[in-house]
Amino acid sequence: MTRLLYFALFFITVAAPAAASLNYVAPETTLKDDMTYTVHWDGSFTYEESVAVRLNTAEAVEDDGEAYIGYSGSLDTVKIFSAYTTTASGQRIDVLPDKIIDQQGDGDGDDDSFSDEKNRVIIFSGLAPGAVEHYHYIINTTTSDFPGEFYTVENFPDDSAIAESSVTVIAPAALPLFFEPDGMTGGRVASPGPGKTEWVYHLRDLPARAPEDDSVGINDYSPRLAVSSFPNFAAVGAAYEERAARMAAVTPQVRRLADRITAGITSPYAQAEALYNWVSRNIRYVAVDFGDGGYVPNDDDAILAAGYGDCKDHVTLLKALLAAKGIRSSGVLVNWNDEYWSPKVAMPEYNHIITYIPQFNLFADSTAEFAPFGVLPTLERGKQALITGAPGIPSRLVTLPLTSGTIPDMARVVTHETLAADGTVSGGSVVTDSGREELADREQFADYDTAAGQQAASDLMARYDVQGIGSLAAGDPHDLSKKFGYATSFSMPGYAAVPGPGTMPMPSGVPTFNALAGLMRETALPVRTEPVPCAAINTEEITTLSLPAGVRVKMLPADTHFANAIGRYDAVYIGQGAKVVADRHLLLHPLGPTCDPVEYQQMRAIGFAIGRDMRATISY
């Protein structure tokens, strides 16, 4: 059963390294998984599930020895009918009552989220490879997320095998339902009784596939069933706004705050930017979700009093502040994760909400605390999203932009370094960036305190196998009102044998967070069968190396000019007396937010070109 309880930001989890399909052993096999939704006229429902899962490996025994049944502590009740293990020899071992326990769900406080989401945990005994876990339970959901509406998505991740699974939906005939099966068979069946309709969908004999490292989310390419009573996406936006809109009233407190933040600022764009920066900096992200709080924000005065809120609260407060200055805005529902699938049937299958300001045709996410105004995080770009609507702003589906509009997504690294008579290379770099690259650098520096410049430099140098010492210095990554950049300094003793003769690669100093060599690491997997998230890249590195007296360059690396359908890499080397200048430029321009296996190979080819160039040497 899928249920979105609250909008929350989270980090991508990386799948296990890909293995050859022929050598992959599914950790478990679902022998049976029968799910039944009985939907009521008001959108509430009961969900019944009967499961039998065979554990195939010792790893599965270690990782999957418990079953977790998620539910809302305030909206749901759970009843377990049976739970037991069947060993490989056929012995039945029932789960004792004290081995069925409740625990808090996602809201453990460690990720700035607090909710009434809970887990009913079944702890099985007698497990070993070949054992089968059986459990059968029912959940009564007393209140629909959206009154009078029902929706759900059942995903069947194919990193495990499925022998037989079914989804049954029984609903009042007066409640029209829309279905989107992907990889499943079935449809409407005979009516179970007067005034009722029933649909049954099956999935059989699904083989397991090895997950691919860093691919799009596994649910993007696994079978699924989406069900919804919403007739269209405009109805979804209206249902969200029905309860959310009134929370963004322009109260006297909000008006005073908006006036104070924008004092002396006359440009509407600059006013919007100042208000966005204030919300981003001053409203701490905390997801607090109880009851219907998954879809209903707090009112703006309550948000100001608390000083924190989740993404709904951020959008609500920013909307009110903008309205106080005569600037209209709307919420935009989107998924903040590594999944790019979008349902064709209308439903609120989103876990995040951001802001749209039509006056500037601009999307902004104030919960992404390091994102400058109008710069979206990578995981939101190019995705289907739903503008929920507001007076004068119609609710509609949109595709979020791939770029930051008039703000270029680029990084420029200028390095000056000197080779001393003892073979030490020392120098420094200045990094200027904007758009997505600035957002990423702010995030990186936020992981280090102000005194940790040397530790940050050491981490980067170790990551790219550069021997030496260095330091990093930057401004405040949280201050969005100021342009962000940073500088490095470094010393690499014994880098070259001087006076020679000899050869050496062009020294890199402290690798930057935007290092060109990163593409080589991101394209290390030889072959992919699924898409990967990808983004436009525009990075230039200009390095000037000054040579000591008595050292003369005999041969420079050959220039590189490599291009294909997805981008290009250029490297030009120039000898200027006692100096060598290397100008390297990487440009990637994917057509969408993901790259398919063919585009991945094109990226990989560019990565190889970078690798060959980085290994090229200067002869002296």
Image (cartoon, rainbow, N blue to C red):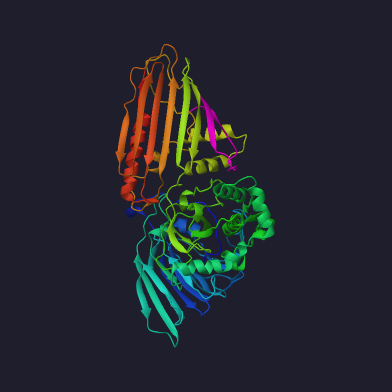
In the picture shown, does residue 169 fall above or below 582? below
For this orientation, the residue located farthest to the top is: 550
Q: Position of residue 445 (x, y in %)?
A: 56, 39
* Count of marks overlaid on the render: 0
Q: Nearer the viewer, residue 321 or 147?
A: 321
In the picture shown, does residue 342 fall above or below 41? above
For this orientation, the residue located farthest to the bottom is: 194
Q: Residue at x 40, y 44 (%)?
A: 536
In the picture shown, does residue 358 fall above or below 185? above
**Residue 456 appears in the picture as rendered:** yes
For this orientation, the residue located farthest to the front is: 266
For the C terminus, the quadrant is top left
User: From the viewer's perspective, is 561 left or right of 422?
Assistant: left
Q: Position of residue 56 (x, y in %)?
A: 42, 60
Q: Is residue 20 magenta?
A: no
Q: Nearer the viewer, residue 330 or 493?
A: 330
Q: Residue at x 63, y 62 (%)?
A: 249
Q: Position of residue 201 (x, y in %)?
A: 38, 73
Q: Position of residue 327 (x, y in %)?
A: 56, 55
User: From the viewer's perspective, is 370 left or right of 25?
Assistant: right
Q: Residue at x 52, y 56 (%)?
A: 354
Q: Is residue 484 magenta?
A: yes
Instruction: Specify the quadrant of the image occupied by residue 557.
Output: top left
User: Magenta segment, which residues?
Assistant: 467-492
User: From the viewer's perspective, is 67 left or right of 163?
Assistant: right
Q: Residue at x 58, y 62 (%)?
A: 105
**Residue 124 appears in the picture as rendered:** no
